Image (spheres, rainbow, N blue to C red):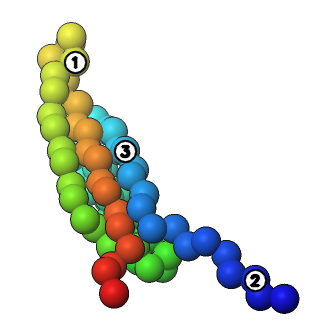
Amino acid sequence: MIFQPDSLKDKVEFFETGSLIELEKHITKKIEENQALMLEVHHVSHNVTFTPTGKKFYTAVIHFKQPSK
């Protein structure tokens, strides 16, 4: 009997915070965790908006992908 689990090939993660430093910490942690799953960063998209009270709100989307062979 051959057992071959499907590997994770693509993963998209979303991040949001009120501080750019916190956003960077979350992203760095997730990059390290996903490297253990053999995923690398394929694309990063980020944005900053203002809340109705005038505070900055940071968001990011990271697409992780399995390296091509």
Compared to 15, does 66 lie above or below? below
Position of residue 55 measured from the top left corner of the image (x, y, whole percent): 19, 23
Position of residue 69 measured from the top left corner of the image (x, y, whole percent): 33, 87
Q: Earlier in the sequence, mark 1 or mark 3?
A: 3
Callout 2–callout 1 Cβ contact below 8 Å: no
Mark 3 sits on what residue?
14
Q: Is residue 27 visible?
A: yes
The amino acid beneath tag 3 is Phe
The amino acid beneath tag 1 is Thr
Position of residue 52 measured from the top left corner of the image (x, y, whole percent): 21, 11
**Residue at x 42% of width, y 61% of height:** 10
The amino acid beneath tag 2 is Phe
- Label at residue 3: 2
Q: Earlier in the sequence, mark 2 or mark 3?
A: 2
C-alpha distance separating marks 1 and 3: 18 Å
C-alpha distance separating marks 2 and 1: 50 Å
**Residue at x 23% of width, y 31% of height:** 57
Mark 1 sits on what residue?
51
